[in-house]
Amino acid sequence: MDSILEFFHSLLRWGVLLALVIAIVVSWKGYFAKSPIIVWHRAVAIIAMVLCHVQLLIGSVIYGMRYASFADRFSGNPGLLRFWKMEHIGTMILAIALVTLGRTLSKKAKTEDGKQLRVAIFYTLGLILILAMIPWPFMSKFMNAYGWL
C-alpha cells in the first residue's frame, strides 16, 4: 500500500511543480504588466493550491505509515533520519501554508495588481522551500536511495 502511495506522491510532485511555476509566471507577468486577472489565471492558482494540499495529504499518510520504522531504516545515517522525520515534513507543511496564505490574502486584496503580487510572492516562497526539500537524486545523501519518476 505504501509503495502505491509513494508512487503517486512522486508522480504528483511534477504536477505540483508545474502548476506552481505556471501560477508564479502568470502572476508576476500580470503584476508587472498591470493586466487584469482573467479566469484561467485564477484557476491555475487554485489548481496549484489544491495539488499542494493533495500532495500534503498523501505525504502525511505515508509519513504516518512509516514513522515507526524510520529509526530502523536510517539507523546508519542520522542525517537521513533527521531529514525524513523533521526537515522534509516540516518544511513542506510550511511551504504549503505559504501557498495557501498567498491564495487567501490575494482574495482580500483590493486591487488586481495587489492580488497578483500576493500570489506571486507567496507561491514563489513556497516553491523555493519545496524545491529545497525534495530529495533529488543528484544530492549526495539521497543518491541511489529511491526510485524516481
Image (cartoon, rainbow, N blue to C red):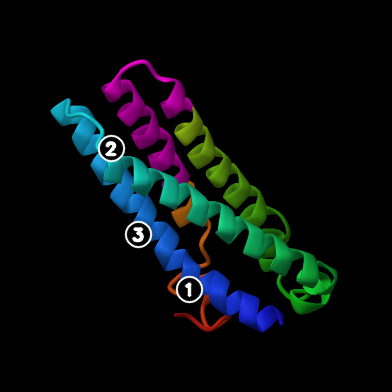
Determine the residue positioned at 34% across, 36% down.
Answer: 120
Q: Quadrant of residue 65?
A: bottom right
What's drawn in magenta, residue-wise? 105-128
Furthest toward the front, the residue is 39
Give the vertical position of 4 relative to 65 (above or below): below
Q: Position of residue 73 (x, y in %)?
A: 76, 78
Circle 3 residues within 10 Å: few <14, some 14–19, many ≥20: few
Residue 35 appears in the picture as rendered? yes
Determine contact: label 1, label 2, CB under 8 Å. Answer: no
**38 magenta-colored:** no
Q: Which residue carries the number 3 mark?
A: 18
Q: Position of residue 100 (x, y in %)?
A: 53, 39
Q: Is residue 113 left or right of residue 143?
A: left
Nearer-N-terminus badge (1/2): 1
Q: Type of residue at label 2? A: Ser
Q: CA distance from mark 3 to mark 1?
A: 12 Å
Q: CA distance from mark 2 to mark 3?
A: 14 Å
Q: Which residue carries the number 2 mark?
A: 27
Q: Is residue 63 left or right of residue 53?
A: right
